[in-house]
Amino acid sequence: MSSRSVPKGRNNNAAGTKLYYVMVGFSMLALMNTDALAGPLRDPTTPLHKVIVTESEIDLMLFAIANVGGKNFAIINGQRVYEGGVINGAKIEEINDKYVVYSHKGKRSLLNMRLSLIK
């Protein structure tokens, strides 16, 4: 019987190599799934200077946005409000043709018009 010899300088440990790659793969998966690395997703087309706002946290319903005499106003919960106005404890910061930005308890939030109403 002849025995095969391993050439000098080569490690013929295939199981150890496979285990190494499996461990590296699991480590990478664990790092990708940590909350420390994952943050809220940001729209890559949004300019960096734009303030990120969250969804509505209080019960506000945006019915309409209009401009009369060069002044924007919104109908929220059936009431007409202007920029700077207050409704249900929320201060209206900005009224755009597609959304309203308001602040409540120091947190800025966004009310969007329904897509079916936007031209």
Image (tube, helix red, strand yellow):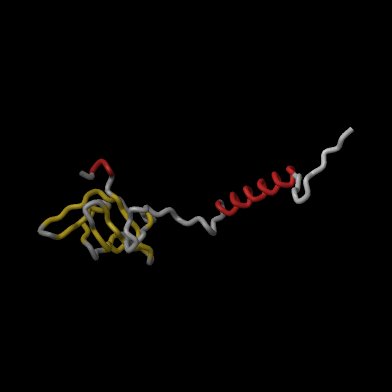
Q: Where the C terminus falls, by quadrant?
A: top left
Q: Where the N terminus falls, by quadrant?
A: top right
Between 46 and 13, the one lying in front of the other is 13
- Residue 1 located left or right of residue 118: right
The residue under the point 64% across, 50% down is 24
Between 39 and 94, the one lying in front of the other is 39
The residue under the point 69% across, 49% down is 20
Between 101 and 82, the one lying in front of the other is 101
- Quadrant of residue 102 in the image? bottom left
Q: Residue furthest top?
A: 1
Q: Residue furthest left?
A: 69
The residue under the point 75% across, 48% down is 11
- Quadrant of residue 53 in the image? bottom left
- Residue 42 located left or right of residue 2: left
- Residue 81 placement (x, y as % from top left): 22, 59
- Residue 10 located left or right of residue 111: right
The residue under the point 47% across, 57% down is 39
Between 109 and 88, the one lying in front of the other is 109
